[in-house]
Image (spheres, rainbow, N blue to C red):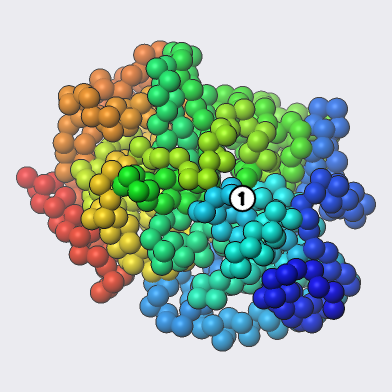
């Protein structure tokens, strides 16, 4: 066999995979533009990519996935470890032996007639000590093209692997795309991922959820940092001061929108800088502050709901060099999704390639996506390439909740902030298969992504409180409160900057009168958030900022039941917070 790398471990592994999967050809990716263009031409010829209108959307393509393969499949996602307890009740577990046996049988000969691509990639800036590398082996050209946008992929990553030695191994095949033969297996003790039967982003672009979050969280705990499902945004005030904020929201709850929002008209002189929209790797610095890097190089965003009013920055970056997945196409060959324009254009082709008629359901799949380089975003900042990351002023947790959770509150201290993150609940969305709109616990928005026992993860978070003295302040937000008739109480999108301003004011601590202490945390006083120019319903601010004691007592009971699943692993500090809140709600 040919020698393609100086890294013996990598060469041996690739040779073993060739023997197991029996591809017709093996291609080591260098990440070059010409390689990308060749792949695109091959996919166009094979019909797996469709070229969109080259005048309005140069170098934009549409991929239609198998209709049974449109979202992450959490029930088919496993963490395989020596001890089941290590993965906790928040993960599906399988023994290492069984996990390997199950998938290796499916990988046997699965690349016959196909090309096997070896994809070296780096998560994070190439020259950052905080970055980590991986190699994905895949038989999907679509995956390779997406990995080139989403990561620093190719020669430079391989150089880094050859210099540093260690890398995460990720083996992927679309297999026969049958959900019955689909598994997303993680072997954290071995830094290995094996994924078969899906071409969907979160299941197949292994750098993202599998490496940067599930294995990343495992590595982070061992090494004393945090791998989080968070956007990173810089907020610059008219005086030129920039505060970086990391915010965790469940999938399809507006992370991309917040990461690149445009300040409202009334906020002249404010600027937003985008560092990342989905994942943050957070490391303590020598000054006791936390520093975040975005391990990704692109956005794999949800298309529906992206429009001129909701996310103009995103819209502007999507009219060239973008791969769309499962959106609809207009008669003119332009991409379309719900929320882009109203009424829906006549004569469209839907996400499955069928003629679209009014009343025949959504034209684009609710989890249809765009893949685009971060550099195409007007608010992207070169600070995202900073090897040491950006210092965090605040951490924000949030969920999608019609009721209960106020627009915003600040935690009383780090420990209470960890509690606020650990008790996040949110309505489910189309980013994962299953029922949409059901409230489930989604601590730190990591329910589908924490690669080990949540209780141990919370202990890891808590340990930072004792070790570092300049930690960011922790907040909780809810942009999704509705009134009795189902209307949103808060306008959201760019106007969320008004809430973020209060967050920053609280961190600076200049104004002692902009908050009231309650059992659940510090809430803004009713006029502390600037609402000038907004047309809110009468009483909306009051409703958004009140603590309904009875509803919260009920919530405390629900959180207690949830924490009970974690048994002896449960950190007592968090149960202590629950007791305190319960006591204060009685008072
Ligand atoms: C994503 C997700 O794709 O969270 O980012 O599902
Ligand atoms: Mn995500």
36 and 78: which is toward the camera: 36
Q: Is mark 1 within 8 Å of ligand 1?
A: no
Q: Going by the picture, which residue comes out furthest to the left?
A: 587
- The image shows residue 356 at horizontal and vertical percentages of 77, 40
Is residue 366 in view? no
- Asked where in the image residue 441 lies, by quadrant, the reply is bottom left
Q: Is residue 92 above or below residue 543?
A: below
Residue 517, above or below 193: above
Identify which residue is drawn at 26% across, 22% down: 528
Question: Can residue 575 be seen in the rendering of this structure?
Answer: yes
Residue 2 in the image, given as x and y percentages of width and height: 85, 74
Q: Name the residue under label 1.
A: 126
Determine whether 443 is above or below 515 in the image: below
State the residue at coordinates (42%, 28%): 242
Q: Is mark 1 on a helix, strand or loop?
A: loop
Looking at the image, residue 493 sits to the left or right of residue 112; the answer is left
Of the pair 3 and 32, the residue shown nearer to us: 3
Which quarter of the rendered picture does the C terminus lie within? top left
Q: Residue at x 83, y 64 (%)?
A: 27
């Amino acid at each position: 066999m040919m020698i393609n790398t100086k890294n013996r471990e990598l060469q041996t592994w690739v040779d073993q995979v060739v023997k197991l999967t029996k591809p017709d050809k093996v291609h080591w990716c260098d990440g070059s533009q010409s390689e990308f263009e060749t792949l695109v031409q091959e996919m166009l010829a094979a019909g797996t990519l469709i070229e969109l209108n080259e005048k309005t959307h140069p170098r934009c393509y549409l991929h239609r996935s198998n209709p049974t393969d449109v979202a992450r499949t959490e029930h088919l996602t496993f963490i395989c470890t020596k001890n089941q307890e290590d993965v906790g009740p928040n993960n599906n577990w399988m023994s290492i032996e069984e996990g390997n046996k199950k998938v290796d049988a499916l990988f046997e000969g699965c690349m016959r007639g196909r090309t096997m691509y070896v994809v070296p990639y780096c998560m994070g800036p190439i020259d950052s000590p905080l970055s980590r590398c991986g190699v994905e082996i895949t038989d999907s050209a679509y995956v390779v093209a997406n990995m080139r946008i989403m990561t620093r992929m190719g020669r430079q990553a391989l150089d880094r692997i050859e210099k540093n030695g260690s890398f995460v191994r990720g083996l992927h095949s679309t297999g026969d795309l049958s959900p019955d033969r689909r598994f997303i297996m993680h072997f954290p003790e071995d830094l290995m991922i094996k994924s078969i039967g899906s071409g969907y982003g979160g299941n197949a672009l292994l750098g993202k959820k599998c490496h940067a979050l599930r294995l990343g969280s495992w590595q982070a705990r061992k090494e004393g940092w945090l791998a989080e499902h968070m956007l990173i945004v810089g907020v610059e005030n008219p005086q030129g001061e920039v505060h970086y904020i990391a915010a965790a929201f469940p999938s399809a709850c507006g992370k991309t929108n917040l990461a690149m929002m445009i300040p409202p008209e009334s906020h002249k002189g404010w600027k937003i800088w985008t560092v990342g929209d989905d994942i943050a790797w957070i490391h303590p610095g020598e000054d006791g502050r936390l520093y975040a890097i975005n391990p990704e190089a692109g956005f794999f965003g949800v298309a529906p709901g992206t429009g001129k009013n909701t996310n103009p920055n995103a819209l502007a970056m999507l009219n060239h060099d973008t791969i769309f997945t499962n959106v609809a196409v207009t008669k003119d060959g332009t991409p379309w999704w719900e929320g882009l324009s109203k009424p829906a254009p006549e004569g469209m082709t839907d996400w499955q390639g069928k003629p679209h008629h009014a009343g025949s359901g959504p034209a684009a799949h609710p989890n249809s996506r765009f893949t685009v380089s971060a550099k195409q975003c007007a608010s992207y900042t070169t600070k995202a390439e900073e090897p040491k990351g950006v210092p965090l002023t605040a951490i924000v947790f949030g969920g999608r909740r019609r009721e209960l959770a106020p627009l915003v509150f600040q935690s009383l201290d780090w420990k209470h902030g960890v509690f606020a993150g650990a008790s996040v609940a949110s309505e489910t969305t189309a980013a994962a298969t299953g029922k949409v709109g059901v409230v489930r616990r989604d601590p730190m928005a990591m329910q589908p992504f924490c690669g080990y026992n949540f209780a141990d993860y919370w202990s890891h978070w808590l340990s930072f409180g004792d070790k570092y003295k300049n930690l960011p302040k922790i907040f909780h937000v809810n942009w999704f409160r509705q009134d009795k008739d189902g209307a949103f109480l808060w306008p959201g999108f760019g106007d969320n900057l008004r809430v973020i301003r209060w967050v920053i004011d609280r961190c600076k601590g200049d104004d002692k009168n902009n908050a009231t202490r309650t059992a659940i945390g510090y809430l803004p006083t009713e006029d502390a958030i600037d609402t000038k120019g907004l047309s809110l319903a009468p009483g909306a601010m009051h409703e958004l900022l009140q603590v309904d004691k009875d509803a919260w007592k009920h919530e405390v009971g629900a959180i207690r039941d949830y924490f009970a699943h974690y048994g002896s692993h449960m950190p007592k500090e968090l149960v202590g917070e629950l007791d305190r809140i319960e006591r204060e709600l009685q008072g």
